[in-house]
Amino acid sequence: MKRMRHMRRTAPELAGTRREGRSARRRAADRLVLAIVSTMAFGVARVTPAYAHMGTGLPGGFESGFRHPVSGWDHLLAMVLVGIWGAFLGRPLIYVLPVIFPVMMVGGAVLGMFSVPVPPVELGVAMSVLVLGLCVGLAIDPPVWAAGTIVATFAVFHGYAHGVELPSAADPVGYSVGFVLTTGLLHAFGVGIGLLTARPKGILVTRGLGAAVALAGGWYLCLALGL
Amino acid sequence: MRGGALPAALLCAALALGLASAERKAALLGLAVLVVTACAVAVGSIPGTWSDAVFLGCWTSVIASAAIVHAPRDLKDWQALALSLNAGVWTGAVIALAPSKGDLLEALPVALCALPAARARRQGQAIVLKVLASWLIAVAVLGAILQFLPATPGYLADHLE
Amino acid sequence: MRCCRSLLLALAALATGVVGARPGEAHDFWVQPGDYWVAPQVATSVTLLVGHGPLRQRSPIPVRRIMRFEAVGPHGMRKDLRPSLQLRGPRDEGTVAFPEPGTYLLVLQTDARAYSLLPAIRFNDYLRVEGLTPALLFRQRTNRANAEGSEAYSRQAKTIIQVGAETDPAAPVTRPLGLPLEIVPDVDPYAEPCPKKLPVHVLYHGRPLAGALVKLTNLEHDANPIETHVTDETGRAVFNAPQRGNWLINVIWTEVAPASSDVDFQTTFSSLSFGFSGHP
């Protein structure tokens, strides 16, 4: 009798169990789909030497593009700082800034592709490290439009550097995917660091990081100015 | 190289994000339409002189499909099917120009991301889809602009008269 | 959230394939006969080829740009072969036949109305790979190293064909033919006994050209040259003489275009091909 009571379920409980079962099956199906897609996706950008008409530009595809944003500490620090600052400022900037940066970076890349004269790119990149470091270090909380404008302006300089190389790449699409993906992942990494502010003393750690990076930005600026 | 599986795979990824806001049945039907249309177009032959137009169509479709993520309303069934048909046509056309038709088998499975994308949207994680869509739009804009460059791009041989 | 992580991983995996794009150019241009050794009065095909490795293909050059295509043979023989050119035929650009035994040169010269515009990085790399150092230095001196590079270019090609088994000491092989950029061998590569060394002179507008990068490539394995040399102050480079297979020697030279020109440089490509296919 006890066992029967134990086993007896009410109608809502049974319905809930069926829903849980369906939900679990769907989750399993989703994971299986993602596993299959991930496995196959490794081959998507692969090119074999047997292709009859490969590009003849310089070796440049996904791998080169993926490495390009991390080829210099100044690029890398700036993009991580965008994520940190976004996390620091909270919604909506925590996701608006990592969307603005790639989009405006494309604008800069287009300028680079057409060799449009701009102020020296190294100067712009160094300024981005300095300014973004100060914004985090000093916990500057501007209006959304101002934060967006700052990030958008610096994104143009970072994109210009990628755009100059893009036309010479033998696989420019792979190259674009590479540097856009790295940029996004660095932002995500920065957001992860920025979420430290939720922890005790997290704000101090984050601001300390920002200040240290701002010092590095000052050094890059001196280098760019030839001082 | 210009073609191959990557542009087609990016279009399938953009469609996957776009279908995330459609009803599950419409999304599944859309995926079927994508596969059938892409296969039908890919087995045909497309003149090489059309390649610029085909790639422009592909990149425009990536932008349009990815931009759906930002639409305020869910995708209606007929809109999902139209989007899938469009993606199928351009996916197939790009593969028809590729050196190997086997690239289609590498590109099409990426569209299956529509299922977990829909789940993410239902769980309130639409912002992730918007961020991914912005990346795809960025790559598509660059891809589209390449063919308007005055200089010989890297995927073409130089000094070929 | 787990789902989003998976989605992110999948899309990250999407782009993780290795892209093995290799550098390559279409700088080589030559006249390829069906066989380099033929019998008298036997027709052999002629094909205009450009590029090397996986990029080798028939040249798309239009016939209006070919200024000179002739056969130069023993005893001052010259024959204009342009009427027999059928560009972009199904398999070749036409056929040639030689009634008398001897060593012949097929000579092709184009005008300088081909145009190339390359992005900065790629143009600098092309100048570096082809040994066009003066052009690189010029771009650096004039602060144009980050600008696109434009050229108007022309092609010259010579091919040595042996008709009959006996080589002819009076063959025109070792004499210049008046091309703007020309590779002139000092010895006949078909001479008997086979020479061990193959010295060549590079002439630019009839004068020895120093500092030019000259490459020897095996046409059966032409992804990379076998030997490269820079010409000395007398315009001379010395290669090991091949005794089997089909071969291409090529050189490129460029000079700054006049200020009134709409290109930066005027470039000339020149080649000499020979081989032992059909050798009895």
Image (spheres, coloured by chain):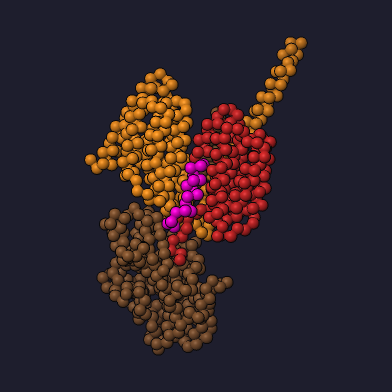
Q: Is residue B89 visible?
A: yes
Kindly identify the residue that appears in the image at 42 percent across and 31 percent down. A145
Residue A194 vs residue A126, the one in the foreground: A126
Kindly identify the residue that appears in the image at 38 percent across and 34 percent down. A150
- Residue B121 rendering spot, x and y as whole percentages: 58, 31
Q: Main secondary structure of the magenta part?
A: helix
Q: Is residue A227 left or right of residue C136?
A: left
Which colour represents chain B?
red
Which colour represents chain C?
brown
Residue A214 vs residue C101, the one in the foreground: A214
Quarter that holds the C terminus of chain B: bottom left
Residue C68 vs residue C38, the one in the foreground: C68
- Residue A85 rendering spot, x and y as whole percentages: 40, 29
Task: Inspect the magenta stretch and tell me whether residue C86 lies in it.
Answer: no
- Res A140 quadrant in image: top left
Chain identifier, orange in the render: A
Kindly identify the residue that appears in the image at 55 percent across and 60 percent down. B49
Q: Is residue C87 left or right of residue A74?
A: right
In the displayed structure, would residue B52 be above or below residue A223? below
Q: Is residue A35 visible?
A: no
- Residue A215 rendering spot, x and y as whole percentages: 29, 32
Q: Is residue C227 left or right of residue A54?
A: left
**What residue range appears in magenta?**
B136-152
- Res B30 quadrant in image: top right
